[in-house]
Amino acid sequence: MNNAFRYTPAVDIMVMVVGLLLVFLMAITYNSKSKSFRIFHSCTGLIILASILNIVYFAWIGSSIKPPTAVIHITHIAYYSILTITMALYNYYLAELVSIPGATMKRQAWAIWGSWDIGVILISYSVVRGPMPVLLSDGWYQLSEHNPFYILYAIGILGTMGLLLYCKDKMIKQVFWGIFASYILSFALMSIQEYHLQRSFTTASLMLPILVMMYLLHSTPYDRLTGAVNEENFEHMVRENYKNKNGIILMFLNLRDRRGVVQLTDEMSTDFYRMFPGMVKNDVLFRLNSGRYVEVFPKKQNPNYEEIIDNLIKAFDILVEKFHRDFKIVITEDVDFISATNSYAEFVSEVEERIPFNAYYKVTKKDIELFQKRQYILAELRDIEQNMDLDDERVEVFCQPVLNVRTGAYDTAEALMRLSLPLTGMVFPDQFIPLAEQEGLLPPLSRIILNKTCKAVKKILEDGYEITRVSVNYSIPEVRDEGFCRDVLSIIEENGLAYDKIAIELTESQNELDFEVVKERIDELKDMGIKFYLDDFGTGYSNMERIMELPFDIIKFDRSMVMESRRNDISREMVNSFAEMFDKLKYRVLYEGVEDEVDEEMCKDMKAKYLQGYKYSKPLPISELHKFLKKS
Ligand code: C2E
Ligand code: CA
Ligand code: CA
């Protein structure tokens, strides 16, 4: 039998099903459709089409009802044309993948169209010239042509492998070997089928590279240029290492360009990727969601890790020199409690805040302790929020009495928050207020402070002491909240206290958008008798116009203003003129941080209505405030 081949549609059906599944999966899982992804997508679509055409073609040959001969020919020609263009697209895809420059890309495109045209002409000629294909016996087909596709295929696939070898250095080794192996397998499959006079596996062998690319480039965690692995895998690695107690070194790098975006250019990535192998054994490079990279290697396989770190730093120095990027590098060994909670990302960003740019930093025991304490405080804050007990014992109210200059008596005070936690004891505001604010955990704390302050004031009054009001600190985001006024009013009310016994301290907002809302809130609460203090005047960039538009009652001059005034006459004159202006406009001026007699005299000369500071009292538990108050 001359030119007779076996064919069964089973393999093509399989290819079609797998192809459809891939297309479906891609449609539902990929959000960012890069150019290379779209090429890849097209290849899959073409393979599905090819498998259908091949099934139809052989079905027609074997069937008694045939369409016109031309239709059969066209189906066959279309099948091989599609396979040819798919192969050409593989090359295009590879070129795109390794970012071959524009001019080469253009040549590549021409080569693709050229090879496709030639392929179609040759195949068409061969098909049309030959006799009609016929079904000989079950599974054996007498085909018309001496098909030139298989020669084109051999040339094409060898060309692609050549291109791959040419780009070898630009690719990470897993990707290179994966794709290379898929071509070898494809070639082997095609040769075996040729040897066995088969035609069932042609489409399938062209499907192989697609499967491999799908796995390596579009579904595995590899960053195509740096070979970095994603955060999910980083966390998995951390968990495994923690379980097996294998010591590791982690080297975090945070790179930024002028705009502060953490991203590597293609060129830099390639250099970057090449930096690690050769110096370190069994290392893995990860890319975290924040854009940081982390190079991880085991201590056991790298006993001279101290030396390795130094060498990596040196190599890195050369790299940043070349690319002019700002960076922060944090190096640490694995730490049990951080591994257990998989919180290296948080740990490193906290450490980074303390170190300057363009520095290498080896983590110390103190950094770890600080982080541990912070994590502990955070966990307690979350628990406080969860419990939402207005009498939570972990939140304590301290306060500082304020001197009324006119009467010479203490008749107001400021409530100041402290945390009292089982493991750390007393925690001061600088250690938890910014943290709570950042994590949105301030509102529950404020509610507790307000509630406890109300209770304390109530008791003070019941015990027969005189007190005009106590002020409580709030942050602007809290005030912005819809439920703010309702919350404040209901807590005061539930304690059976008059509204005017409570005041609220706010700092100036730098955000213009807050203005209208804050004004509305203040107006609403002022109507109920609650007074407002502008806190920390003189620390930010004060927008006088805005301050005047908000109906504050008392302006608190920050301690830094008091210190400035003591420095020289000019500073004092400046502070004094602010105080005089506020005084004329019927605001009352309070000086904070009055520490001695000199401060006191000076402030009194500068329109002071109220004085607060260590000279009178350090913050004390609110239960002791009565010691400063007059009996009524
Ligand atoms: P602030 O509102 O400016 O509070 C005044 C701070 O100055 C208090 O620190 C107080 O102890 C301190 N201080 C008072 N007199 C003197 C003095 O003569 N010399 C010096 N050097 N310092 C003095 P504290 O209690 O550590 O509070 C720090 C900050 O934490 C407060 O600054 C406030 O911004 C915040 N904070 C405290 N309690 C609360 C609260 O319940 N809610 C909110 N949102 N913030 C709070
Ligand atoms: Ca305050
Ligand atoms: Ca203040």
Image (tube, helix red, strand yellow):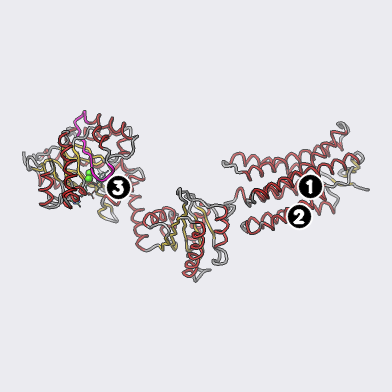
The amino acid on which the numbered mark 2 sits, given as a three-letter code, is: Leu
Is residue 44 located in the magenta-colored stretch of the structure? no
Instruction: Name the residue beneath numbered marker 2.
Output: 158
Ligand 1 lies under 8 Å from the Cβ of mark 3: yes
Residue 151: give its label: none
Residue 62, located in which quarter of the rendered image? top right
Q: Residue 50 location, x and y as percent?
A: 76, 41
153 to the left or right of 130: left
Can residue 533 be found in the magenta stretch? yes
Ligand 1 neighbours mark 2 (CB distance < 8 Å): no
Instruction: Provide the residue designation for mark 3.
Output: 433
Range shown magenta: 526-541
Who's the residue at 83% across and 45% down the image?
Answer: 7
The answer to which of marks 2 and 1 sits earlier in the sequence is 2
**How many residues crowd mark 3 within 10 Å: few (<14), some (14–19), many (20+)?**
some
- State the image quarter where residue 35 is shown: top right
Q: Earlier in the sequence, mark 1 or mark 3?
A: 1
Q: Is residue 134 visible?
A: no
Disc 1 marks a residue whose amino acid type is Thr
Q: Which residue, given by chain and number where applicable, does mark 1 sit on?
A: 202
The reply to whether the C-beta atoms of the residues labelled 1 and 3 are less than 8 Å apart is no
